[in-house]
Image (spheres, rainbow, N blue to C red):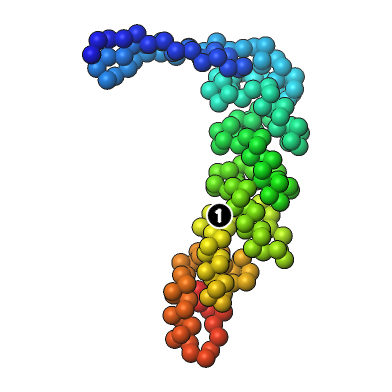
C-alpha cells in the first residue's frame, strides 16, 4: 500500500485542531497542533469569571464546549455553571434535551451533579416515568431513580415481585434485586414455609 499524506482540521469555538501525518501499511504517524482562540477565551472568562489556559482551551475544543452550550445550560437553571461543569456535561453526553426530558419525567429537582449521575448510569426519561408510575404514593427523587437503575431494577422485575406477593415498596424490591432474588426462588421459599407468610425481608 502506497504511503499517503493525511491532513485533517477540526474547527471549534475554542480553537483549531490540525492533524498532519502519513499512512502506510496499515499504520499512521503524525502530529497534532492546536491554535487557541483567545477571543473565545475572553468571552468565556468574562461570562464565568474564570481564567482559561491554552491547555484548557484544547480540552474544550476536543469536547466542543461552546459559548452557546454554556449559555443554554445556564438558561436551564444551572446559573453557576463553570467551564469545568460544561466539560463534565460534554464528557458524559448530557444535552439540553436530556435535561428537559428528565425534568419532564418528574425529576425537576435534579441539580447538575444529579443529571450527570443519571446520564452516567443510563437513566432515560422513560425509565424515570415508569418507575415513578409504579410508586405513585412515593416521591422518587433523582437519587432513588439512580439507585434503582444501578441495581438493575426494571418495571418487569417490579411486576414479577408484586405478582409473587412481595415488595409493595420499591426500596424493598431493590433489596431483593441486590440479593439476586427471582420470582421462582420467592415462590419456592413460600411453598416451603407452608402456611407461614414470608415477607420481602425474610425471602432475601
Q: Is residue 181 above or below residue 107?
A: below
Q: Circle 1 sits in a helix, a strand or a loop, which is it?
A: helix
Q: Quadrant of the N terminus?
A: top left
Residue 137 appears at what percent x and percent y?
72, 66
Q: Is residue 190 above or below residue 145?
A: below
**In-front residue for pair 174/161:** 161
> Residue at the spot x=43%, y=80% of the render?
188
Say which quarter of the image contains residue 83.
top right
| Label 1 CA crowd tier, 10 Å (few <14, some 14–19, many 20+) | many
Residue situated furthest bottom in the rendering = 195
Residue 182 appears at what percent x and percent y?
46, 70
Q: Which residue is mark 1?
A: 149
Q: For the image shown, how many numbered marks are present on the structure? A: 1
> Residue at the spot x=31%, y=14% of the render?
23
**In-front residue for pair 156/6:** 156
Q: Is residue 54 visible?
A: no
Q: Is residue 139 visible?
A: yes
**Residue 5 in the figure: left or right of residue 203:** left
Q: Is residue 31 above or below residue 86?
A: above
> Residue at the spot x=53%, y=62% of the render?
156
Q: Is residue 123 above or below residue 171?
A: above
Residue 15 appears at what percent x and percent y?
58, 14
Say which quarter of the image contains residue 31.
top left
> Residue at the spot x=44%, y=75% of the render?
185
Residue 62 appears at what percent x and percent y?
53, 23
**Residue 138 in the figure: left or right of residue 159:** right
Say which quarter of the image contains residue 91.
top right
Amino acid at each position: 500500500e502506497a504511503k499517503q499524506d493525511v491532513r485533517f482540521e477540526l474547527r471549534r469555538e475554542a480553537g483549531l485542531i490540525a492533524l498532519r501525518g502519513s499512512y502506510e501499511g496499515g499504520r499512521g504517524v503524525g502530529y497534532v497542533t492546536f491554535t487557541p482562540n483567545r477571543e473565545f477565551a475572553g468571552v468565556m472568562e468574562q461570562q464565568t469569571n474564570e481564567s482559561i489556559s491554552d491547555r484548557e482551551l484544547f480540552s474544550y475544543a476536543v469536547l466542543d464546549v461552546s459559548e452557546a452550550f454554556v449559555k443554554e445550560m445556564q438558561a436551564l437553571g444551572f446559573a453557576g455553571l463553570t467551564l469545568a461543569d460544561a466539560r463534565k456535561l460534554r464528557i458524559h453526553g448530557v444535552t439540553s434535551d436530556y435535561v428537559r426530558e428528565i425534568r419532564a419525567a418528574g425529576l425537576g429537582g435534579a441539580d447538575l451533579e444529579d443529571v450527570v449521575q443519571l446520564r452516567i448510569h443510563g437513566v432515560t426519561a422513560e425509565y424515570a416515568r415508569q418507575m415513578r408510575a409504579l410508586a405513585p404514593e412515593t416521591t422518587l427523587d433523582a437519587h432513588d431513580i439512580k439507585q434503582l437503575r444501578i441495581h438493575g431494577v426494571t418495571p418487569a422485575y417490579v411486576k414479577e415481585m408484586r405478582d409473587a406477593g412481595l415488595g409493595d415498596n420499591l426500596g424493598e424490591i431493590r433489596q431483593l434485586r441486590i440479593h439476586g432474588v427471582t420470582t421462582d426462588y420467592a415462590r419456592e421459599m413460600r411453598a416451603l414455609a407452608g402456611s407461614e407468610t414470608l415477607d420481602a425481608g425474610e425471602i432475601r
